[in-house]
Image (cartoon, rainbow, N blue to C red):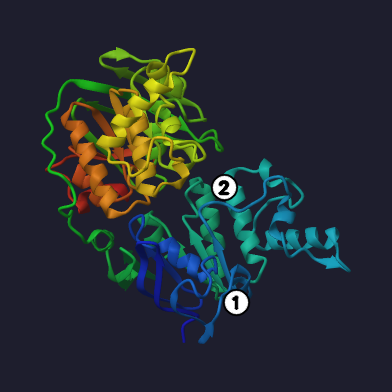
Amino acid sequence: MPLLEMRNIVKEFPGVRALDGVSFTLEAGEFHSLVGENGAGKSTLMKVLSGVYPEGTFTGEILVDGGVSHFRGIRDSEAAGIAIIFQELSLVKELTVGENIFLGKEPSNFGVINWSELYHKASNLLRDLHLPIDPRVNVGSLGIGQQQLVEIAKALSQDAKILVLDEPTAALTESEVETLFGILRNLLARGVGMIYISHKLDEVFAMSDRITVLRDGRTVSTHKAADITKDGVIAAMVGREVGDIFPNPDHEHGEVAMRVSNLNAYSIDVPDKKVVDNISFDVRRGEVLGIAGLMGAGRTELLMSIFGAWQGPVSRRIEIGGRQANINSPGDAISQGVGFVTEDRKRFGLILEQTILDNMTLAGLRTISGKFVTNRTRETIAAKGPMQSLRIKANSPLTIAGTLSGGNQQKVVLGKWLLTNPKVLFLDEPTRGIDVGAKQEIYAEINRLAKEGLAIVLVSSELPEVLGLSDRIIVLHEGRMAGQFTRDEATPEKVMAAATGHPQ
C-alpha cells in the first residue's frame, strides 16, 4: 500500500485546466522526483497536496496510508504528516531560528510561551539534523543556504512522514547541497517519503528511486530512475511541436543594435554567488533573440543587470548603436533607448489604480508631454495610437488599468514602452497569464515590430514560444551560456538538453 496516492486530480483556473487527471504515488522511504517544463503543473499539484488549494477547488482523491484524506486547508495537510517547502522561503527574518521553527505551534503553559522548552526542542532538532546553527540567532543574519536548512528543520518539527521539496537547492552552494542531501538520506532511512521538484537532472538522477514527468498538466510517464536516461526524461518533458499559433518570422536583420560583453552579476543575498556568469551577446535590428533556460537559470537577472535594475554588484560593457552606453539605472537605460516589459506586470509594469493613459505615458512622459508641465492633450493623442494598434479593449484611455483583463493589461505595458521609441526592447515572459487569443495578438505585434527594425530580446519559460518567435536562441544554465542556436538549428530536445546542463 502506497504511503501517498493522488488519483485523477483535476484543477482548473478561469480559462485554464492546470491539472488534467494527474495520478501520482509515493512509497515510504522513497525519493520520487517530479519533473517537467515550467508550467507543466508540478507546483499546482503540490499545492493541492498541501491544502493551499483545499478540497472543493479540485476533483480527484488524495489517500494517505490507504485512507481518503479531506484537506480543507494547510493545517489539515500538516496534521496528515505532509510538509512542503516551497521555492520561496516562508521564514520571518526578524524572528530567531527557534521562533521560526515552532511558529504557530510554540510550546506553552496556560497560554504563555515556554521559551526555555522552545529553544531546547529547537536545539535538539538542529543537532539531530547535524545543523550547526544557534537557535537563538535571527534568521535574517543567516545566509540563504542556512535559511533553506532552517526551513527544512521547521517542516520536520511537525513529524512529517511526507516531505515535499520544490527547487530546494536553487540558492545553495555545492557544499550546502551535500549537507542537504546527507540530511535527506538520513530521513529516507527513517521511512520519510520525499517528493522532489527540480530542473537539475544531475540531482534528480543522483537521488531518485522513481521519476514522474508532467507535461501540460498531465502525467506523461513514471519510470524507475535506473530504467530511463536523462535524454529520455528530456524527450518526455518536451514531447510537442511548435504549433501554427506563431507568425512566420521573415525579418531582415540590420546592424548590431546592442552588444553586451562580459556581463557578471552577483546575488543580492549571497555576495560571492554569481547569478549571471560572464555572458556576452549581441542583438541586431530586426532580430528576435530568444533567451531560454529553466527557472533559476539567470534569465531575468541578465535583463535587469543590463537595464540597471539589478540590486547586486554588476560588471559589464554595453554598446548601443556602436557606442558605449553607461547604464547605472533604469532611467539611464530608457534615455539610451532600452525598453523593458517586465516579468511581473502587476508589480513592476503597471500602477493598477491609475488610468491606461497615466500608465502608458509614464516611461516616456518627458518626450511626450514636456519636461516641466504635463500636456494632457498630447498625452491622450499619444496613448490612442498604441490603444488602436494593439487593440486594447477599453472604453477610453481613462479606464483604470486594474479593471482590464490580463491580456489587455499586458498590452498596456507593451504600449508604454513603445511610446519611448526604443532601439532595443526586452520582453520578459510577455504572455504569462493571458489567454491564447491575447497571446496570438502579442505574437503578431512582436513579429511586426521586428519587421520594422526593432531589436527584441525575448525571455520565456514556454519553450514553444521561444522556438516559434526567435530568429536566434541563447540558452542559459545556472547563470552561464550553455548553448546558442539559429532558428534552423534549434529543436526542443537540443534547447532543453542545454537548459538542463547536458548539451547534445
Q: Position of residue 283 (x, y in %)?
A: 24, 28
Residue sitting nearer the eye, 171 or 90: 90
**In this rendering, would 489 be left or right of 186?**
left
Look at 40% across and 31% down and name the residue there. Answer: 360
Q: Quadrant of residue 318?
A: top left
Neighbour class for label 2 at 10 Å: few (<14), some, many (≥20)? Answer: many
Neighbour class for label 1 at 10 Å: few (<14), some, many (≥20)? Answer: some
Alpha carbons under labels 1 and 2: distance apart: 28 Å
Q: Which residue is mark 2?
A: 145
The answer to whether residue 203 is above or below residue 286 is: below
Can residue 120 be seen here?
A: yes
Q: Can you tell which mark lies on residue 80?
A: 1
The answer to whether residue 501 is above or below residue 72 is: above
Q: Position of residue 209 (x, y in %)?
A: 40, 71
Question: Of helix, strand and loop, which one carries label 1?
Answer: loop
Q: Position of residue 83 (x, y in %)?
A: 58, 67
Question: Of helix, strand and loop, which one carries label 2?
Answer: helix
Nearest to the eye among marks 1 and 2: give it. Answer: 1
Look at 61% across and 71% down and name the residue there. Answer: 78
Q: What is the three-letter code of the residue carrying label 1?
A: Ala
Residue sitting nearer the eye, 231 or 67: 67
Circles 1 and 2 in contact, beta carbons < 8 Å: no
**In this rendering, would 322 be left or right of 270?**
left
Q: Can you tell which mark lies on residue 43?
A: none
Can residue 316 be seen here?
A: no
The answer to whether residue 375 is above or below residue 139 is: above
Residue sitting nearer the eye, 431 or 397: 397
